[in-house]
Image (spheres, rainbow, N blue to C red):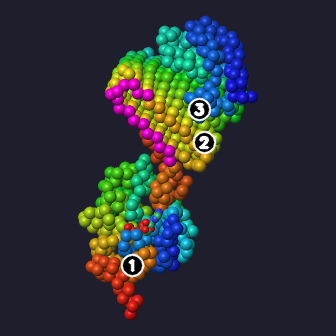
Amino acid sequence: MNELNNNVDIKDWYVSHFQAFENSLNGSSKAPFHQIRRSAIAKFADLGFPGRRDEEWKYTNLSALLKHKFPVAARPASLPAETVRQFVFKGLAENLLVFVNGRYSKALSNYRASAAGVVVDSLENALKNRPEVIERYLAKYAPFEEESFVALNTAFAVDGAFIYVPDNVAVEQPVHLLYISDVSAGSHFASPRNLIVAGRNSQVKIVESYHGVGESPYFNNVVTEAAVNENARVDHIRIQDEGLNAYHVYSLETHQQQNSVYWMVNVDMGGALVRNNLTLTLDAENCEGHLLGFYMANGKQHIDNHTAIDHAKPNCFSNELYKGILGGKAKGVFNGKIFVRRDAQKTNAYQNNKALLLSDDATINSKPQLEIFADDVKCSHGATVGQLDNEALFYLRSRGIPQDQANSILQHAFANEVFEHITIASVREHLEEIIAERFARL
Amino acid sequence: MIAIKDLKVSVEGNRILKGVNLEIKAGEVHAIMGPNGSGKSTLANVLAGREDYQVDSGEVLYRGKNLLEMSPEDRAREGVFLAFQYPVEIPGVSNANFLKTALNEIRQYRGLEKLDAMEFLSLVKERMQLVEMDPKLLNRSVNEGFSGGEKKRNEIFQLAVLEPALAIMDETDSGLDIDALKIVANGVNKLRGKDRAFLVITHYQRLLNYIVPDFVHVLVDGKFVESGGKELALQLEEHGYDWIKNEREASVTM
Ligand SMILES: Nc1ncnc2c1ncn2[C@@H]1O[C@H](COP(=O)(O)OP(=O)(O)OP(=O)(O)O)[C@@H](O)[C@H]1O
Ligand SMILES: [Mg+2]
C-alpha cells in the first residue's frame, strides 16, 4: 500500500473507534469538554496523518507507527508497587502522581497537598470538579485545529495530570508525574492530557517521566498545556525513557503572561520513534522562556525535536539549547523556529544545537528557522555536529582512564551543559546515574 | 627502566624519528634538548601511546615489557606519565573528578584500595602545596581557561598525585614565570627518588640549573647527535646547535 492510502486507512481506524470510546464515557460525555472532543475528531478526520511531503515531517517517517492498528487503551489493571518504585525519582516519592496507560492510579499515587488551594489531581477528576478552570484553559492553547496529533489526543483525552496553583502560592516540593505504559497484556494507544495552570506570582516545579513495562508495541500521544500567568515561574522537566517498543509523540504548548518565567529541560533516552512538538508563546512583555534539551539514541532509534518560540510581545528573552548524542544507526532531527512578531521589539532570542555522532551511520538533520518581523532585536543561532575530541580522549587515557570510561566522561561533559540547568538536585543525580549507565552502552 | 632501540617513527608518511636509542635507569634524570621540529615531542608522545604516529621499526622495552604494544591507559597504569607541552582543555570535566578517576584506576591496577573522597582530598591538598597550585583550579574544568603557567603547574600536580615510575616532561618550563619555574622545579626535585626516572625535554639551561640532570642528549633531525653530562647543556646554551653540527662535521673531516 502506498503511503497516502495507508495513512487514510489508519486514520479511518482511529476515527472509527471514536464512537465506541464515546459510549464508554457514560456521564462525562455530557460535559462541555466533550463538544471539543467531537470537534477534534472531526478535525482529525480532515487533517489525517502527516506524510513525508509535509515540510514539518520531511525527516521523520511515520510509516513504522502507521502500520499498526493500535486499540484505544482500556482502563488498566493496577501495577505491583515494586514495578512502579523503580521509576520513582529519589526524594519525590511523596509528591507522586502515577498514570498507567494514560489513566490516573489513585492506589499507586502519593500526594499530600502542600498549600491551600493547590490542586494536583487527575484531569478526569478535574473535568468533574473544576469546570471553571477547565473551561478557561483546557484545549485553549494546543492547536487541535491544525495539528493532527493534537487533534487525535484531544478527541480521545480523558485523563492526565491537572495542576493548578492559585495566585501568590509557591509549591515547595516538586511534583512528579509518572507515566507508565504497561503493554504486558498487549498493544494500545494512549492519549495522556496534561494541564498546568500557574496563577499570578506562583511557583511550581514539575517533573514528567515516561516509562514502559512489557514488550508489545504501543503509541503514546501526549499533549501538555501550560498557562503561566503574570509573574509566575514554572520549572518543567520531561524525561522520556520508554522501551524500543514505544512510539511517542509529545506536544507542548505554553502561554506566558507578563514577567513570567518558564524553564523546560527535556530529556529523551528511549523510544523507537519520538517526536516532540514544543511551542512556547511569550505573549506579554518581560517574559523569559528557556528550552533545554538532551537526547541520546542508539540502534535504529529516531528522535525528532521540533521546537518553536513565539515572541509575540516586546522585551522578552528566550534561550534554547539542544544537545544530542547519536550512536549506531540512530537518527536525530532538530528544528528550531523562532518567531519575532512585528510588535516584539527588544527581543533577545538565542538558539544553539549541538550533536555528537559516535558512529558513521548515525545522522542528524538540524534546521534553525528564524522568522523576524521586528527590527530592534537580538537573535542568534548556531549548530555544530561533531565527534568526540580525540585530543581530550588521549589526554584522559594517558592518565590511566580506560577508553570506554574516557568516552563516557566526555559524553557526560557534553550533556552536562544541559543537565546543569536541572534545579532539582535529586532528579539531576538520578538522571546522571541512568545516563552514565547508558553511555557505557553507546 | 626503559630501553629505546633504533626507534623510527613517521607522521603522515614523513619520517620524524630516524633511529633513536636511549636507555634510562631507575633514579636517573635525562634531559633532551634540540631545535624546534627535531622530534622531541614526537618521541614523548610515542612513549605515551598517541595513536597518530606510525612506528616503522625499533622497540621500546619498559620494565621488561614491550611498551609499544600497550594501550595509553595501560602505559599510565604501568607508571608512564607525560606532562604535555600543550595540555588540552576539556570543558565540562572537573579537574578534581578527572584526577580522582585517574588515580583510582591506577591504584586499582596496582592492587591498591581506591581512595574515598576524603582521602583523595587530603592527598590532593598535600600535593598541591608541592607545586603551590591554586586550589580553585581543582574545581574548574580540566585546563579550561587556565593560563599557560597554570596549565603547566597542573601537569606537574597530576604527576605528583599519580606518582609515575617514568615521568616525561615536555617543555614544562615554557610558559612558567621565573618564580613559578623555581617552585615547580623544587616540586619535581622532591619527587626524585631511586625508583623514579625523569625524561626532561627543554630548550633552556635554566630549568636544568634547578633540576640537575644526570645526562643530556641532543636530538637533531630525529636522531641523537650528542650525549653528555650536565655541562653539555651549558655548552649548548653558549654556542647554540650550530656548534654541535660544526663539531660533528669537523670530526667527520678529521
Ligand atoms: N600530527 C602531525 N602531523 C603532521 N606533522 C607532524 C605531526 N606531529 C608532528 N609533526 C611534525 O613532526 C616534526 C617534529 O615535531 P615535534 O613536535 O616532535 O618537534 P619538537 O622537537 O617537539 O619541536 P618543538 O621544540 O618546537 O616543540 C615537525 O616537523 C612537526 O611538524
Ligand atoms: Mg615539542
Query: Distance between the Cα atoms at labels 3 and 2?
Result: 16 Å
For image coordinates 53% across by 28% down, the residue present is A277
Chain under callout 3: A
For image coordinates 62% across by 25% down, the residue present is A50
Amino acid type at image mark 1: His
Residue A285 x, y percent position in the rendering: 35, 21
Indicate which label's residue lies in the foreground, 3 or 2. Answer: 3
- Drawn side of residue A360 relative to residue B186, left or right: right
Nearest to the observer: residue A155 or residue A56: A56
Is residue A380 inside the magenta stretch? yes
Residue located beneath label 3 in the image: A58
Residue located beneath label 2 in the image: A330
Q: Is residue B7 above or below residue A246?
A: below
Is residue A74 inside the magenta stretch? no
Highlighted range, magenta: A371-386
Q: Earlier in the sequence, mark 3 or mark 2?
A: 3
For image coordinates 45% across by 75% down, the residue present is B222
Nearest to the observer: residue B213 or residue B4: B4
The image quarter in which residue B33 lies: bottom left
Residue A30 makes an appearance in the image = yes
Among all residues in the image, which is located at the extreme top? Answer: A30
Amino acid type at image mark 2: Ala
Chain under callout 1: B
